[in-house]
Image (spheres, rainbow, N blue to C red):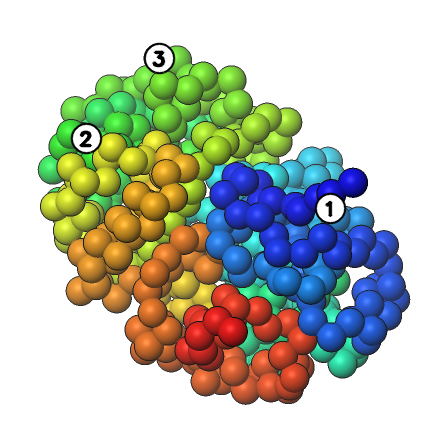
Amino acid sequence: MDPIFLKNWAENLQYNTTNVHYPETVEEVQQLIKKLSKMKALGSRHSFNSIADNDQNLISTQKLNKIVALDKEQSTVTVEGGMKYGELCEYLHENGFALHNLASLPHISIAGSISTATHGSGVENGNLASSVSGIEFINAKGELIQLSREDGDVFNGAVVGLGALGLVTKVTLDLVPTFEVAQVVYRNLPMEALKDNFNAIMSMGYSVSLFLDWKTNLINEVWVKKKLQKGETPDFPKELFGAPMASENVHPVESISAESCTEQLGIPGPWYDRLPHFKMEFQPSAGKELQSEYFIPFAKAYEALMAVNEIADQISPHLFISEIRAIKGDNLWMSTCYQQDSVAIHTTWKQEIPEVMALLPKMEQKLAPFNPKPHWGKLFTIPYETLNERYSRMDDFKGLLEVHDPNGKFRNDFINKNIYGLKSV
């Protein structure tokens, strides 16, 4: 029987080894790390690039998915790194708590999400990693390392670790009191309305997303998610700068059924069932796809969108949809929003790999005046030299890697190329 190679969620990437280990305890992870010479941690397999790939060993966190402790007095929860957000949220809600932010998909693992600075949306909401108050990982020596905010700058360096410091076994997350959210969608907003009203539009709700296909000078859909006070009746304007409110649920890709999407039409529901765009029990997003995403300063958002719009006729035939979101800055060294309030220009592409990989440099060139940072778990072609310039703490991060992985057990081609500027061997 031929060996079975795992693929990532979208099936654009096949991992380069069949040696996949499924430990169930921290002790098992330590034994594996001490025994093996090369490895990478593998979470929910949602990255679109090779950040979690390895040609020798993969250690899956699939069975490290338990809730460790809920501290009601400190308003924190500690979970194993392999737990998915969608598996945690209902438990938190039932106990009167919530996370401040969620990504558009609830299907992704917590450790993998924070390690790549994955985010949700909201001008006042930091990314998912910004809610981490404690982290535990096993480094290349097999040592159990525990860090918290009290450890200061070293902690800020370790949270968005790109899977290069070791395998994350536990994460402690800050919680807020549970809350309800109502969301509505506006359709066909004139792009021109963003010029003088971008901040106002992105601030209309707790979380706001703009979806566009670059085929016209319209934003196809504006999703506004409003946080409700207890007993509050949601109140949304019927129009948004000329864009009418949708009268039925819609999918970000209008040709796809909205069955998989969270409830719209202003109907209140728990935070975990409104902040994501997609329900946990359904196939998320478009399915067979590719993704890229670039983070630019919030203040330059409209200029950046207009720059991309100059090549709209080249990119629009190859995409499903683009999404624009705002994310508050943080102090995490390798975060795409390090000390910068940002806007993310995300694109879900058709799985046309040669065409998309040829288009990415063109998009990156258009965005170059705005110093874009690419999402660590998505496709990009920005070279090491440029990344090194844009991450002011890159050398500090390398210093942290030297402490915890001096011989490169957790390094792979992705880390060698993008963190060390080395060519693939």
Amino acid beneath label 2? Lys
Q: Tag 1's secondary structure?
A: loop
State the separation of the CA atoms marked 3 and 1: 50 Å
State the separation of the CA atoms marked 1 and 2: 44 Å
Query: Which of 144/59 is in front?
Result: 59
Judge whether 60 appears above or below 255 on screen: below
CB-based contact (under 8 Å), mark 1 and mark 2: no
Image quarter (top left, top right, bottom left or bottom right) of the N terminus: top right
Q: Dot 1: within a 10 Å radius of its alpha carbon, few (fewer than 14), some, or many (20 or more) residues? A: few
Closer to the eye: label 1 or 2: 1
Residue at 21% from the left image edge and 54% from the top image edge: 362
| Side (left or right) of 323 relative to 361 | right
Q: Which residue is mark 1?
A: 3
**Does residue 46 appear anywhere in the picture?**
yes
Amino acid beneath label 3? Ser
Numbered badge on residue 247? 3
Judge whether 149 appears above or below 247 on screen: below
Amino acid beneath label 1? Pro
**Does residue 108 appear anywhere in the picture?**
no
Which callout, 1 or 2, points at the residue further toward the start of the chain? 1
Query: Which of 55/150 is in front?
Result: 55
Measured as percent of width and height from the top left, residue 49 is found at 49, 54
State the separation of the CA atoms marked 3 and 2: 23 Å
Q: Which residue is mark 2?
A: 215
Which callout, 3 or 1, points at the residue further toward the start of the chain? 1
Residue at 78% from the left image edge and 72% from the top image edge: 36
Measured as percent of width and height from the top left, residue 371 is found at 26, 66
Measured as percent of width and height from the top left, residue 397 is found at 51, 80
